[in-house]
Image (cartoon, rainbow, N blue to C red):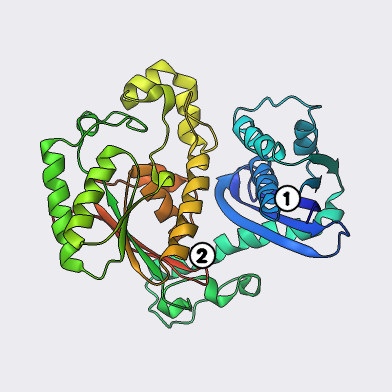
Amino acid sequence: MSEVIVEADGGSRGNPGPAGYGAVVFAADHVRVLAERKEFIGVATNNVAEYRGLIAGLAAAAELGARVVTVRMDSKLVVEQMSGRWKIKHASMIPLAEQARALVAGFDRVSFTWIPRAENSHADRLANEAMDDSELTATVREAVAAGHAPGDQVPVPKAESVGANKFSPGWTGALGKPTRLLLLRHGQTALSVERRYSGRGNPPLTDLGREQVERAAKMLAAKGDIAAVVSSPLQRARSTAEAAATALDVPLRILDGLIETDFGDWEGLTFTEAAQRDPILHSDWLGDSSIPAPGGESFDQVRERIEGVRRDLVALYPGQNVVVVSHVTPIKTLLQLALGVGPSLLYRLHLDLASLCIAEFYPDGGASVRLVNDTSYL
């Protein structure tokens, strides 16, 4: 498929508010649909959601092997910025535009055209479905919090746009056997003792860290029925994973996508030191997941690669139990994906060293969280 048309849209119910995007790839005849993408992205602005839709559409076109792409969007801002006629002024837009341009560079030719909203109805519908999905998920969570038992009749709005089998587990209708991810954080290092940003640096485990790892490995061995251990390439995670794989007598696979956030110039600094060094940027970074650390990456970028890891794990280990050894942000991001919530979870959830969480991902797209921050074995 050498030539395609990409239409993309994004929306936010509140601006900023609950946001989602939609993208559709048409054949050159603008009739045959080749691919669709949609996702709820948490709390964001319209512009962020629109850029995320563009990125998803371009990525889908690349997966199809397209060489020439015509992008049609009703966002004047995105079209003009991507065409180079408008300057990008907002810091949160810069990394998204860079990501989109990196995708554009992979094609022979890409053109951007503004269209009226009425002509972008397909992508707009997908974006609204993504936001509707989040409302349905919230309704189910609220019902459980209110004390509804499995099987109770719970009023759910707009269910026809989502499908009963999108949610999990059991009584919510998820189908098939899930891939169960046992999410294990690495053991203690010197940087974690001092509560310093520890991203791409490679400090070894402390004596206590090695003891934590052995206790976690013993706990996992007692559980059994685990197909494999996968790990971040960083040594603190790899040492933790090697102990688990040895105790379980299962293969160990290193996945680069499980690496911790790149904190750039803040690597090795405490929270206070980073805030004093870059007070405005640090404050903005805490409130906007699209803003990267200086010289590093944003939490949105982390989520992009963790989504890829999740897809790979579900494909590699269908219906199996897998130990995933990683770091705070990747583990929180996998929990965020399972819960279908926005990036605020990254700032509100605490994970101890060598703690265990469990998330399940079903083949029909459903997901559930079974356990968070268990340290009973330490």
Q: Residues within 10 Å of mark 1 (few under 14, many from 20)?
A: many
In the rendered image of this protein, does residue 208 appear above or below residue 59? above
Residue drawn at (86%, 59%) of the image: 30
Q: Quadrant of the N terminus?
A: bottom right
- Residue 178 in percent (x, y) is at 41, 71
Q: Amino acid at mark 1?
A: Asp
Nearer to me, 85 or 246: 246
Which label belongs to residue 9?
Answer: 1
Nearer to me, 46 or 366: 366
- Residue 372 in percent (x, y) is at 29, 57
Which label belongs to residue 137?
Answer: 2
Q: In this image, 18 relative to 148: left or right?
A: right
Secondary structure at badge 1 equals strand
Q: In this image, 356 relative to 274: left or right?
A: left
Residue drawn at (27%, 66%) of the image: 226
In the rendered image of this protein, does residue 108 appear above or below residue 169? above
Q: Amino acid at mark 2?
A: Thr
Say which label, 2 or 1, has the lower sequence index: 1
Residue 91 visible in the picture: yes
- Residue 114 in percent (x, y) is at 85, 42
Q: In this image, 222 relative to 361: left or right?
A: left
